[in-house]
Amino acid sequence: MKHELERVEIPGEHEARERAWRVASAAFAARQPAPRRAARRLVAVIAIALVAAVVAAALSSPGRALLHSIRLTIGVKGARPALFSLPTSGALLVHSGSGLWVVQADGSKRRLGGYTSGSWSPHGLYVAATTTNELAALTPTGAVRWSLARPLVRRPRWTGTTTDTRIAYTTRDELHVVGGDGRGDLSLGSAPDLGLAPLAWKPGPRRVLAYALPEQGIVRVIDVDAKGEEVWSEAIAGKVSELGWSSDGRLLLVATTGPNSAAVGLYRLPSRRPVSVFREAPGLVAAALRPGTHQVAILSRPGEVASVKLGSRTIFSAAGDLRGPVWSPDGKWLLVGWPDADQWVFIPVRGGRVQAVANISAQFRSRTLPRIEGWCCAQP
Amino acid sequence: MQGAQAGSTSDLEALFRAYWPRTFRAAYLVVHDAAAAEDIAQESFLAAIRALDRFDRSRPFGPWLHRIVVNRAIDWSRARALRAETELDERTPAAGETGVQIDGGVVARLGALPPEHRAVIVLRHLLEYTPGEIAELLDLPRGTVNSRLRRGLDSLAEEVR
């Protein structure tokens, strides 16, 4: 019996061990050993003296460098010190404390301006960007093509072909759709929680938009080409945090958060019954459908460790929070942010070495880890 | 253990490398899900690291760790049994992707047992604890451990016949 139990082949055993060691060693490095009881008083006295010395030292330039190096003890080992290139084609749209940035595949960065959010146009030719009271269309070099003044603009989402596009966005309490040239702005409804609504365009020739009333737990799909006619709706338990479509437009992903309702459901419209539900996601943070497939990456943090799963397979885990995930346009890489390590982590989903880049905040002139707004298509 | 308590990463690594394989395996044999087993084993090691300073070195580390792992694995299996779960029906595994698989033989038959019985069998036959030690690890009367062992082994034997 023992022999048989020991010879069981466990899928991904080696990778699991290395992932776990990475997390355990990071947690060990981050921990502060408790002093032995007898020595505690003496240690307390020394600690007070040291705190003053450390504060003084930290204010000096070498001191700051030391603190910085200690902080980096959490993170992927061997991370590159700067973003020299992306692991695959495409360009990133990034929001940091200093505004909106574009990062090309060769690692070159350009700041577009002090915008609060953004989204790529379908072919990466333009960027829809928002400030608190403005929606603007920009070139990837930051030139403004047009802008609209609207209150509390959020979540622009762009869809269409190279010749005819639409941008969906929300204001304080309204859902709007405007042409890619800035004309024909249309309000498609209002509700108190519409300002926070996640939006997702369905891929395909017709302009079909999914949006959620997050507080009410309602997901609606409307045909914008038919004056916003509702083609599907469903009441969902929990607060809807995220919507997404598979590349073929056949599946709608609905992610909900809440103490007892965190789940990721996949719907094949017009059926109201999900074809799949991932309920084993306590501490669900986010989910994203892999381009070109019906696979779902799920980021959750049930305890002190956050993990990214693809189906039932854990592909990355780390101590503390993770942000994202964002898929590369070719579906071969998954990008997550690791705030405690100030790193971006590029995870190869078909095997290979995880690539990480450190010092991300400083590279985008930010105090916090920048947010990835999108990873767009290969260069047009 | 002493070195790890003093802050030595290499000693912690030695401890991890010595205990991870059986800890992960034990979790896997109870939950029959590689991803869940990884989470359970990993969280158990983190719990151990958090409690490292308070750990009494006169006591063995293994039983302490295994108690955490096996109890978490049982909890996970019970919770999973309560959930109506569906898997993605159109999931196409990427090249090189590993799925969850269970070997045939005894291990497949183990999966048919309730998680509490699996745990007792894993503790006895993989981790080689005595029934008395298992009773202590799982906070169970010794008679319960013996009966679970006997019933578990009987079920396995029936499956074989």
Image (cartoon, rainbow, N blue to C red):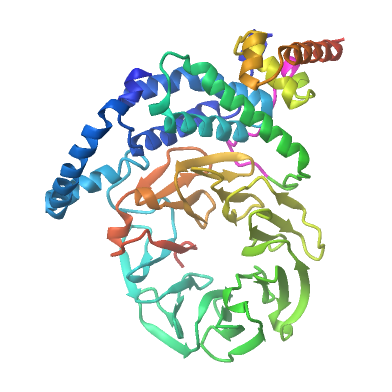
Kindly identify the residue that appears in the image at 65 percent across and 21 percent down.
Answer: B138
Classified by dominant secondary structure, the portion drawn in magenta counts as loop
Q: Nearer the viewer, residue A373 or B82?
A: B82
Q: Is residue B147 above or below residue A293?
A: above
Residue found at x 67% / y 54% = A264
The magenta segment: B92-107
Q: Quadrant of residue A129?
A: bottom left
The picture places residue B145, in percent across and down from the top left corner, at: 73, 14
Quarter-of-image position of residue A28: top left
Instruction: Locate residue B18, reporting x and y percent.
Output: 45, 17
**Quick check: is B97 in the magenta stretch?**
yes
Q: Is residue A139 visible?
A: yes
Between A185 and B94, the one lying in front of the other is: A185
A333 horizontally vs A200: left or right? left
In the rendered image, the quadrant that contains the N terminus of chain A is: top right
A77 is higher (above) or lower (below) than A278: above
Q: Residue at x 66, y 15 (%)?
A: B135
Residue A84 position within the rendered picture, expressed as x and y whole percent measured from the top left: 30, 53
> Residue A207: x and y, percent?
67, 77
